[in-house]
Image (cartoon, coloured by chain):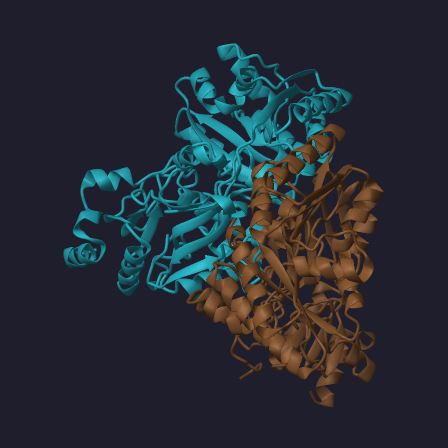
Chain colours: A cyan, B brown
C-alpha cells in the first residue's frame, strides 16, 4: 500500500482510527498459535458498521487484503494478516447496544469480550454460555464458531446467536437472521457468516441468546481403567437424561503429570470431569447419586462428587488450569494445542491412536477434551525445531485419522491457516460449493485471504 | 415437456419410478394450504441420492423445473409445482440407514415421517424432538426448518441435524456437515440447505441428533386476565431455569369456542399450556409448585397442574386437538392457518393487533401459538370468496406488523408461495445476497421455482 492509499484510507476510517506505527503492526501480527507472525501494512480500528463497510468498499476497489482482528486469542492463525494490507481491529467496538431482558437477548458490538459481557449481564441473572477459555471477543467467537466446556448443554456460538449486522466486501451493510427465536424465512445467512472466519463478511453487530444463570451446580470427577470405560460412562450419562453442563476428559498421562508435579489429587487413569446445573437442591443430590451409580456400574476406579461450591472448584481445578499446571510441570517447553472432534463412539479409537503415536514418535503429548461433544485437544510440548516438526507431523496424522473416523478437522478452533490443507479430505465436492460462495460474496478475495481454502490466493489475482 | 424428454427421463429415473397418470399428477398438485393446485407434467419417485442427482442433471440440461415433495403437509404451497415440469417425490425413500445409538444419532432417507421414525426409535429410548403436528417427512421438515410445540426446549429442525447428503442442480452429490457434534470446519453449508425449501438442492439423506425419551412429564394449564399477564408468566417461567418442554398459548376467543361447542374445561381468557420433563419425581413436583407460584404471583385466574399421565393428556387435549375441535365448532367453514413469530416481548403487541383486526374487519379469527418461542398461528375461518379475500388482507397486515415488531414473516411454515411478497421488507439488502447464492447454485432456476423470492422467475428465463 503506497502512502497515497493510506492517506485516502485515513480520510475514510478517520485519522484517529488508523496507524502504521511498528508497535501497532507488531501487536497485530500473531495470535496464540504456533503460526509465524506476519505484519499488516496498516492497522485500522473499526468504529461502526457504516465505517467498516466504507473501509471494505475502498479496500475492494484497490484489491487490498483486510484481516479482521478481535483480541488475538485465535489458535489456528485465523487473524494473522498473511498477505499484509489492512488489519481491521474490532477491539474498540465494545459497547452493549441493548439488553432485551424479557427476550433473553443482548445486542452487542463485536469487540466486547465474552467475560466482560457476562460480568455486565450478571445483574440480570442471565449469561451468554459459550466459553472458549480465554476472554475472546464475541465477534471472534462468532466468526470461528467457538464453543468450549459447556457446549454439551448450551451449544456452540452458532447456537446462541439470532441476528447479526455484517459488512460485505463491496461495502454493503446487511442484517441477517431475526430477533425472533424461530426463523424459517429464506436462506439461513446468519449461519453462513457464523464460522466463516471473516472470509465472507465482517460481523459488526450481533444479537445473542442468553440463558438464566444456574442457581445450583454440582461436580463429579471419576477415573476409569480404560478410555473405553470412560466413554461408556459418557454415553450412559448423556443417555440418562441428566443433561450435564460439562462432560470433560483428561487422559492418564496428563493426570500423572498433574499429580507428580503439583500433587493434584488425581489418579493416573483416564478421568472424566462433570458438572450439573439445577434449580432445586434435591435434583442436584439425586443427580449425583445417579451419576455415581452409573460410573460404579461401569467399573470406575474412584468417584468424587459434591454440591458444595468450594469443593466443586477444588475438584475442577485440575481441569480449569490443566494447561497452566502442565506448563509449570514441564519447564523449558513451549506448547501448542490442536483440536479435532469425532462422533463420541469413535472417541476411544482416536485417543488410542494418539497414544500409539506418542509411543511411536516419542512425543510427550497429553490430552484434554470435551468428551461429551467428542472433541479432543492434544497438547504438544516441544523444545526445539526438530521436536516442533515431529509434533506437526503427529498433528497431521491425528487430523487425518479424525476425519477418517467420521469426524472433523476442527471442532472449535476453526480452520485458519493450520487446517486448510485438510479441507479437501473432509469436505470433498462440498469444498467447491464453499469456493463458489466465496467467489460470489468476495470476488476479489480481499477478506481474510489465506484462510480456510488450501490454495493460496492473493487478493486480485 | 414433450414425449421424447419424458422417455429419456424414464431411462434415467427408471421406468417404474415415473408416471404421467392424471391420478398421480393430481395427488401431487396441492398441499394443505389455501394455495391453488398446480399440476406437474410428470411425477418422478426418487430412489437414491445418485438417481436424484442424475434426474437433476437431466432437468438442468433441459431447463425443466423440479419441485421436491415429501408427503404434502406443507402450509405455504412450498411443494406445489407452480411451473409444471417434474414433481420429485421422496415418499418412497423411507429407510432408516443406520442407528448410531452410542452417538445419539440416526441416518435416514428423506421420505420417512417423523412419527414413523420415532416409533422405530422408541426401543432405543431415543427420539427426534421436532414435531410439526402432521406426520411430515424428515426431508420436508429439514427443507422448511419445521419446528412445533417442543422447540422451546429442544430446538427446531435446524438444531437437530448434523450431516446431510444433498443433490445439486448440476448433478453433483455432496455431503455437508459432519457426524461430529462440534463443527468449526469451513462454511456452514448444512444450515444453508436447511430451510432453503428445495431451491438450492435436494436433501437425499440426513443424520439427525436424538435425545433420550423423558421418563417423567408434568402439565400446567393457567388462564390470565390479559395477554400481557400471560406473557409475563412466559417470561417468568423461561427466566426461572425450569426449562419448559412446551409453553403454548390459546387466545380467549379460541378458549370460548372450545368451551361452548364441546364443553372443554377452559375459561374464556388467554391461556398457557406448559409441559415439563424430568427424570426424578421430586424435580417434577417441585417444578409444578414453582410454576403455580409464579403464575399466582402474576394474577392467574385459574391454574391446574398434574404429574399424572392421563390427567396430563386430558389437560392438554384442548391444545393438541384445538384446530379439529374448532372445525367441529364451526361447521360450514373452511380454515387456513398463518404463521408469524416475534420477540417474546412483542407478543402482546402482536396479539392485541390481531384482536383489533378481528373487530375492524369482522373476521372471526382465533389464535394459538408457541408462546415460549414468540410464535403465533392465526386461524382464519371463511365460507366464501369474499370472506377468504378479507382474511387474506388481514393475514398480510399481520405479517407486516410482525416484521415491524422485529419478528419474521414465518417462524416454522417456511416462505413457499405465500410469504414471498414479504421477503424484501424482512430482509432488505440481505435478499440480494440470497438471490446471488441462488444464482450461484442453481443458475438456470430449475429447483422449486416460484418459491421464496418475490419475483416470478420461470426456469431458463
Quick check: can you spot residue B121? no
Residue plotted at (54% across, 33% down): A149
Residue at (74%, 81%) from the top-left corner?
B42
Q: How many marks?
A: 0
Q: Is residue A134 visible?
A: yes
Q: Is residue B120 left or right of residue A177?
A: right
Q: Where residue A419 appears, x then y in whole percent? A: 48, 45
Q: What residue appears at the point 40 percent right and 61 percent down from the top-left corner? A: A174
Q: Which quarter of the figure is the N terminus of chain A placed in?
A: bottom left
**Where residue B19 appears, x then y in whole percent?**
80, 80
Vertical relation: A384 (above or below) A41: above
A4 to the left or right of A281: left
Q: Is residue A41 left or right of residue A321?
A: left
**For residue B210, what is the image quadrant?**
top right
Q: Quadrant of the C terminus of chain A?
A: bottom left
Instruction: Give whichever of A57, A184 is nearer the camera.
Output: A184
Q: Nearer the viewer, residue B14 or A21?
A: A21
Across and down, in percent, residue A365 comes to 52, 26
Residue B230, x across and y down, in percent: 60, 48
Q: Is residue A243 above or below residue B406?
A: above
Q: Nearer the viewer, residue A212 or B353?
A: B353
| Near-viewer residue (B164 or B281) | B281
Task: Please tell me which residue is depicted at 82% across the width and 81% down the height of the picture.
Answer: B23
Amino acid at each position: 500500500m503506497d502512502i497515497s492509499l493510506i492517506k485516502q484510507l485515513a480520510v475514510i476510517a478517520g485519522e484517529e482510527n488508523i496507524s502504521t506505527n511498528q508497535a501497532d503492526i507488531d501487536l497485530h501480527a500473531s495470535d496464540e498459535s504456533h503460526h509465524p507472525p506476519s505484519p499488516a501494512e496498516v492497522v485500522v480500528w473499526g468504529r461502526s458498521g457504516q465505517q467498516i463497510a466504507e473501509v471494505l468498499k475502498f479496500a475492494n476497489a484497490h484489491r487490498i487484503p483486510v484481516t479482521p482482528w478481535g483480541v488475538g486469542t485465535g489458535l489456528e492463525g485465523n487473524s494473522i494478516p498473511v498477505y499484509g494490507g489492512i488489519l481491521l481491529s474490532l477491539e474498540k467496538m465494545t459497547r452493549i447496544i441493548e439488553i432485551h431482558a424479557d427476550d433473553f437477548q443482548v445486542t452487542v458490538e463485536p469487540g466486547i469480550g465474552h467475560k466482560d459481557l457476562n460480568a455486565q449481564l450478571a445483574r440480570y441473572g442471565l449469561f451468554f454460555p459459550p466459553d472458549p477459555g480465554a476472554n475472546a471477543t464475541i465477534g471472534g467467537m462468532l466468526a470461528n464458531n467457538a464453543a468450549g466446556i459447556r457446549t454439551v448443554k448450551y451449544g456452540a456460538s452458532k447456537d446462541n446467536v439470532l441476528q447479526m449486522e455484517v459488512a460485505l466486501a463491496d461495502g454493503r451493510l446487511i442484517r441477517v437472521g431475526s430477533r425472533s427465536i424461530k426463523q424459517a424465512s429464506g436462506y439461513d445467512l446468519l449461519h453462513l457468516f457464523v464460522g466463516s472466519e471473516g472470509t465472507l463478511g465482517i460481523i459488526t453487530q450481533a444479537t445473542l441468546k442468553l440463558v438464566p444463570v444456574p442457581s445450583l451446580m454440582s461436580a463429579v470427577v471419576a477415573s476409569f481403567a480404560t478410555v473405553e470405560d470412560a466413554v461408556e460412562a459418557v454415553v450412559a450419562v448423556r443417555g440418562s437424561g441428566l443433561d450435564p453442563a460439562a462432560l470433560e476428559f483428561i487422559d492418564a498421562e496428563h493426570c500423572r503429570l498433574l499429580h507428580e508435579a503439583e500433587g493434584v489429587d488425581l489418579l493416573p487413569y483416564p478421568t472424566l470431569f462433570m458438572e450439573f446445573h439445577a434449580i432445586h437442591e434435591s435434583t442436584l443430590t439425586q443427580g449425583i447419586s445417579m451419576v455415581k451409580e452409573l460410573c460404579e456400574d461401569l467399573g470406575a476406579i474412584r468417584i468424587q462428587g459434591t454440591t458444595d461450591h468450594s469443593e466443586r472448584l477444588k475438584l475442577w481445578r485440575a481441569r480449569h488450569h490443566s494447561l497452566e499446571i502442565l506448563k509449570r510441570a514441564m519447564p523449558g517447553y513451549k506448547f501448542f494445542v490442536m483440536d479435532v472432534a469425532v462422533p463420541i463412539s469413535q472417541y476411544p479409537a482416536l485417543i488410542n491412536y494418539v497414544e500409539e503415536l506418542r509411543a511411536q514418535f516419542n512425543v510427550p503429548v497429553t490430552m484434554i477434551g470435551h468428551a461429551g461433544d467428542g472433541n479432543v485437544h492434544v497438547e504438544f510440548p516441544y523444545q526445539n525445531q526438530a521436536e516442533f516438526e515431529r509434533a506437526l507431523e503427529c498433528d497431521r496424522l491425528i487430523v487425518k485419522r479424525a476425519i477418517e473416523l467420521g469426524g472433523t478437522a476442527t471442532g472449535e478452533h476453526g480452520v485458519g491457516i493450520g487446517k486448510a490443507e485438510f479441507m479437501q479430505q473432509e469436505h470433498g465436492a462440498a469444498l467447491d460449493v464453499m469456493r463458489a460462495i466465496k467467489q460470489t460474496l468476495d470476488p476479489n478475495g480481499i477478506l481474510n485471504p489465506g484462510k480456510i481454502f488450501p490454495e493460496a490466493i492473493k487478493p486480485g489475482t
